[in-house]
Image (cartoon, rainbow, N blue to C red):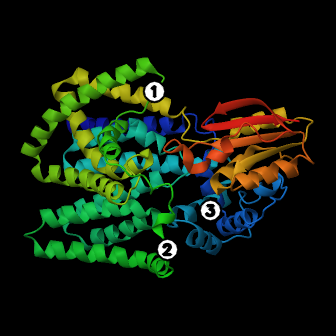
Amino acid sequence: MMQIAKKYHKINLLLLFLVVGFILRLNNLSGRFLWTDEFFTLFQSSGHGTDIKVFLERISRKQDPSLLKAGEFKTFLKFDPHKSIKDVNNSLFNTDTHPPLYFWIMHFWRKLFGDSVLALRFFSVLMGTLSIYLAYRVGWYLFNEDAAKFCALFVSISAFSVRYSQEARAYSLVMVLGLLTWLFILRMENYNNNLDAFSFAVFNSLGFYTHYFYVFISVAQFAYFTASHRQDTAMLRKFYLAFLSSLLLFSPWFIPLILKGYNFYLAEWVFGYPGLANKIYYLFSGISQYIWIFDIYAMLLGIALFIGFLLFIFLATYVIKDMTARYPKQFLFCFIMFIVPLLGMFFIDVVQHGALLKQERFWIFPFLGFIPLAGYALDYGFSKVRIAAIIIILLMFSSSVRAGTTQFGPAPKYASLWINQESAGRRSAVLIYNIRTAVFAQAYYLDDNIYLIPVLDAEQLKSAVRIASNHVDKIFIARHYHPSDPSLMNEPFMETDNIGPEFKFKTKIYKNYISISEFVK
């Protein structure tokens, strides 16, 4: 009877963590505005990526920009029933760095559920909730039932996990696929089952089809299995065969991309950041975001979370001693799965002048290795220093609630609605730097009859003002500032408050990483 009661207690706790995690991921899901990266999901999953590239390149070649209205830009963002998966593939293959799996899924997802903010983000919510259960299973195979529950609890209330389960991007899918491949690796070790080896190969290849930086996770898996099974030739051979099979499954996408001569440095949001000191700073400071993310202006919460972080470090110091004594092989697993992706990011940042460590989203790759470490630490803390563990859990929960209320990056809704209001009854034009994620994001919320003019340089800006002066009474200059680097979606020539004698500067607003300057005749 006691056994049955215990079993139901464990099941109820896991269900509680799943429900709490699901609710946290629903928190303000539709209330937070779509931001620029999510508009990338919109036009790539619609199959319009190639159309947009041609469209903006044609504009950039003109000395005198065309007068186009916002409504003409919006058509590229809507789901188009005439576009197919082939169009999605062409868009990605010819215009961008991203592999196709997430965009394939979103293409069919939008076909079924539409283009509302809730619909676009809900797939990520489901993946984030599934990752809670998978974290539990990984913790169970690695350690024991108690540690497994805390692994699930950690993923459920980690602000980092919540944040990337609320975004219409591929990161929650990466989390699920990474945990699934770990699960099948651990099962393969325990049961030596061919089906588990096959499942690992399939889901590992799907990881590559989701994000190219999934290679960090895959290299960590390879390193762990090679290190821990040196003496077991048969097991090692089985893993290597499964690993090679996953690469072969990915080759139909990757080989044509390489043969095409794809230039990875087209990812301007990754490369071009020299310097070593900042890399080291981000290497050590980034780990704290796994525990909590908070607004730098919320000082009281920040102080509380800092105290909690010190408590976590205190627990972790003792946890590592305990884990290496009781579970040396499992510690090796967690350490390699955490440190290899982190070192991979650091290597690219230092050698190739990358900015992976600087950008919070890329920490999703080492995050997977942090999950079992954190789960074990919370389990240890709850049994040894319960009050400290409870404080950490409560602070993590409060941070996760706040995570649902903050913007990811440039979100143009507020700025566009302000322009719409200021333009009421007046003819207006919005000038913006010619980069697709900013242009189409800005168009999405503008009134259809407001002109939207992408400009590529100072000369085009001057020409746009001259041409617009014959048709409009107001001009707005929109500037999008990416949190990791303000220059990614803006240029210095856009910062002017003097656009010529026909228009005078009136006012400026700044909201959600977007600045709008208004000029009137």
Sequence-first tag of 3 and 1? 3
Q: Which numbered marker is on residue 44?
A: 3
Which corner quadrant of the image does residue 398 belong to? top left
Viewer-closest of 221 and 191: 221
Sequence-first tag of 2 and 3? 3
Q: Residue at x 81, y 57 (%)?
A: 72
Density class for disc 2 (Cα within 10 Å; few <14, some 14-19, many ≥20) is: some
Q: Are marks 3 and 1 in contact (CB under 8 Å)?
A: no
Q: Position of residue 221 (x, y in %)?
A: 25, 62
On the rendered structure, is 185 left or right of 300?
left
Viewer-closest of 13 and 154: 154
What residue is disc 1 on? 296
- For the N terminus, the quadrant is top left
Q: Residue at x 40, y 23 (%)?
A: 302
The amino acid marked with disc number 2 is Tyr
198 is higher (above) or lower (below) than 181 = below
80 is higher (above) or lower (below) than 313 = below
Mark 2 or mark 3, which is nearer to you?
2
Q: CA distance from mark 2 to mark 3?
A: 18 Å
On the rendered structure, is 460 left or right of 283?
right
Q: Position of residue 403 (x, y in %)?
A: 48, 33
Density class for disc 1 (Cα within 10 Å; few <14, some 14-19, many ≥20) is: few
Q: Position of residue 265 (x, y in %)?
A: 47, 65
Q: CA distance from mark 3 to mark 1?
A: 33 Å
